[in-house]
Image: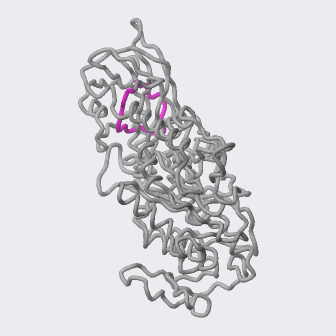
């Protein structure tokens, strides 16, 4: 009876009835919270918020690479000043972005994100809007070098996605007498892309070399937002396709009350790179730490004030919990915000393979080992998150040998453990609760054992069991379960895994949320029968995959 009441409530809220998945669906990426909404109505809405197509692909990408490279690589500091001599940036003759990509692919990464401009403001591409503090202004390659172009070519050749990090903070534009950051300039009508020859005197003049086939944005902005958006336009139109845009929330220094026109930035990304997810915006969010820490429960649907505030850093352990959704307000960016919307935001766990984001040396700087990185991988990718691991190139323009050895070993483990499920030849029996006797196999549920992304099985209640029976007993220590978040949203709040051992069911692992992907880890179990028991959900959930795996450590050669 409780299930049918939930469905009636959904219909009253304008959501489709259980099981629908067609062109008329009203599941969506974000939904408004009305002041009149009851607690039950808010939780029902949250259960029907779904990721966009780009977010689903971002979930699927799983393991990503971060490339911190720039003047800091040569100065040995983490945050530059913006006052460095740009000539300090001079990669050696062995500089080879194709090597970065080869190592990333060997590690199992699917995307690389380059710091095209870090907080110091130095630009690693041939920007038209800064010829003083960029690769245009230095001796390296006679001022014609372009790290972004070299990386983009390597990614295209080797079949890996490309993302770009463009720091909103810009110390060069802060420290220079004629700098644009916080210069108190008036908001003026502007065309993006702007003709650099008329950046100040006629910002409505369109850049003459820009393709007429590309969109033009007419907007009113100040000098720094004009500068930033023109650089974003270059990166999104000349090196693509771009699959992620990273807006960092860190600021070593501010000036003049500079404000960012984030809605305009997001709109520009949507127009120019529709396949890209926006980190620090309405698509992907920071995990809350830089050490590789993960939450016990990772919900993707969070309360948000508005789109501009959607990317503010939030570090609470209970993000997205029932209590946080029902609080009607939340704390972020140094203030309290009213919860006006529910947004689907993919959690991104970012950390570095080294102590620090930039390469400093190959003697004292610690490099994490494969055990630590593989552990973070399983907790992040297996915890409803993506994993963004920094692999900083050195002064020679290469990923160092110690980093490479670790990354290749991590890739070997991922391939050995997760390339094939030990349950693919099994069958699944469905039951509404754990007291029911075993029944004949459920063909639709058994399809969860294949790797087809279109497979979906939805329960008829908030709690249920699925029994997985193998043809023979096997030793396993990993279980993977995925919700069909793309179709109906994230719903599971509590679950456990049992195994039939010594003539009885024994619980071998427990978990809370599932989301896009959950990896349960447990000591070795040798069994033929396993049982997933979903104990509680916000609404009847849908699953898209079940799998069993075994991690033998050390791996066999």
Q: Position of residue 417 (x, y in %)?
A: 40, 30
Q: Give the overall secondary structure of the magenta segment.
A: strand
**Is 549 part of what is drawn in magenta?**
yes
Q: Which residues are magenta?
A: 532-551
- Foreground of the two, 100 or 336: 100
- Which image quadrant for residue 482? top left
Q: Is residue 237 magenta?
A: no
**Image vertical order of residue 536 relative to residue 21, above or below:** above
Q: Position of residue 62 (x, y in %)?
A: 45, 45
Instruction: Indicate the position of residue 535 as horizontal and vertical percent values.
Output: 47, 28
Residue placed farthest to the front in the image?
Answer: 93
Q: In this rendering, would 265 be left or right of 431?
A: right
Q: Residue 281: give x, y in percent of width and height.
A: 55, 60
| Drawn side of residue 355 relative to residue 379, left or right | right
Query: Closest to the observer: 462 or 403?
Result: 403
Q: Which part of the image, by quadrant, shows the N terminus?
A: top left
Q: Nearer the viewer, residue 324 or 278?
A: 278
């Amino acid at each position: 009876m409780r299930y049918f009441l939930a469905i009636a409530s959904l219909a009253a809220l304008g959501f489709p009835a259980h099981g629908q998945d067609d062109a008329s669906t009203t599941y969506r990426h974000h939904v408004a919270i009305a002041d009149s909404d009851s607690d039950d109505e808010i939780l029902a809405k949250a259960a029907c918020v779904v990721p966009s197509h780009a977010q689903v692909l971002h979930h699927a990408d799983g393991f990503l690479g971060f490339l911190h490279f720039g003047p800091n690589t040569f100065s040995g500091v983490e945050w530059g000043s913006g006052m460095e001599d740009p000539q300090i940036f001079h990669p050696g003759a062995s500089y080879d972005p194709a090597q970065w990509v080869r190592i990333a692919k060997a590690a199992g990464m699917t995307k690389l994100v380059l710091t095209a401009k870090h907080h110091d403001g130095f630009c690693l591409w041939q920007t038209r809007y800064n010829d003083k503090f960029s690769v245009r202004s230095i001796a390296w390659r006679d001022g014609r070098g372009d790290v972004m172009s070299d990386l983009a070519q390597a990614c295209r050749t080797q079949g890996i996605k490309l993302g770009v990090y463009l720091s909103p903070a810009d110390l060069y534009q802060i420290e220079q007498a004629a700098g644009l950051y916080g210069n108190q300039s008036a908001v003026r009508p502007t065309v993006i892309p702007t003709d650099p020859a008329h950046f100040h005197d006629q910002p409505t003049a369109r850049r003459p070399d820009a393709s007429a086939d590309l969109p033009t944005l007419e907007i009113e902005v100040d000098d720094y937002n004009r500068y930033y958006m023109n650089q974003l336009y270059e990166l999104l139109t000349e090196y693509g396709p771009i699959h992620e845009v990273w807006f960092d929330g860190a600021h070593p220094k501010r000036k003049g009350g500079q404000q960012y026109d984030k809605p305009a930035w997001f709109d520009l990304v949507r127009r120019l790179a529709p396949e890209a997810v926006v980190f620090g915006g309405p698509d992907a969010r920071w995990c809350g730490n830089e050490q590789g820490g993960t939450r016990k429960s990772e919900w993707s649907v969070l309360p948000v004030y508005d789109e501009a505030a959607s990317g503010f850093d939030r570090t609470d352990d209970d993000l997205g919990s029932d209590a946080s959704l029902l609080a009607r307000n939340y704390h972020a960016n140094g203030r309290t915000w009213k919860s006006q919307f529910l947004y689907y935001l993919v959690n991104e766990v970012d950390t570095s393979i080294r102590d620090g984001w930039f390469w400093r040396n190959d003697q004292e700087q610690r490099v994490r080992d494969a055990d630590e990185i593989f552990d973070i991988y399983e907790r992040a990718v297996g915890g409803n998150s993506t994993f963004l691991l920094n692999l900083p190139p050195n002064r020679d323009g290469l990923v160092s040998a110690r980093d490479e050895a670790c990354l290749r070993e991590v890739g070997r483990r991922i391939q050995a453990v997760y390339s094939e499920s030990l349950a693919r030849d099994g069958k699944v029996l469905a039951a509404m609760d754990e007291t029911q006797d075993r029944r004949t196999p459920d063909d639709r549920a058994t399809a969860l054992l294949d790797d087809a992304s279109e497979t979906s099985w939805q329960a008829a209640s908030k709690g249920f069991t699925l029994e997985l029976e193998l043809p023979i007993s096997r030793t396993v220590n990993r279980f993977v379960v995925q919700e069909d978040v793309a179709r109906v949203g994230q719903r599971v709040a509590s679950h456990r895994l049992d195994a039939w051992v010594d003539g009885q069911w024994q619980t071998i692992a427990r978990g809370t949320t599932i989301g896009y992907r959950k990896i349960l880890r447990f000591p070795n179990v040798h069994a033929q029968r396993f049982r997933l028991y979903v104990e509680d959900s916000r609404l009847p959930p849908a699953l898209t995959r079940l799998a069993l795996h075994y991690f033998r450590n050390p791996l066999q050669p």
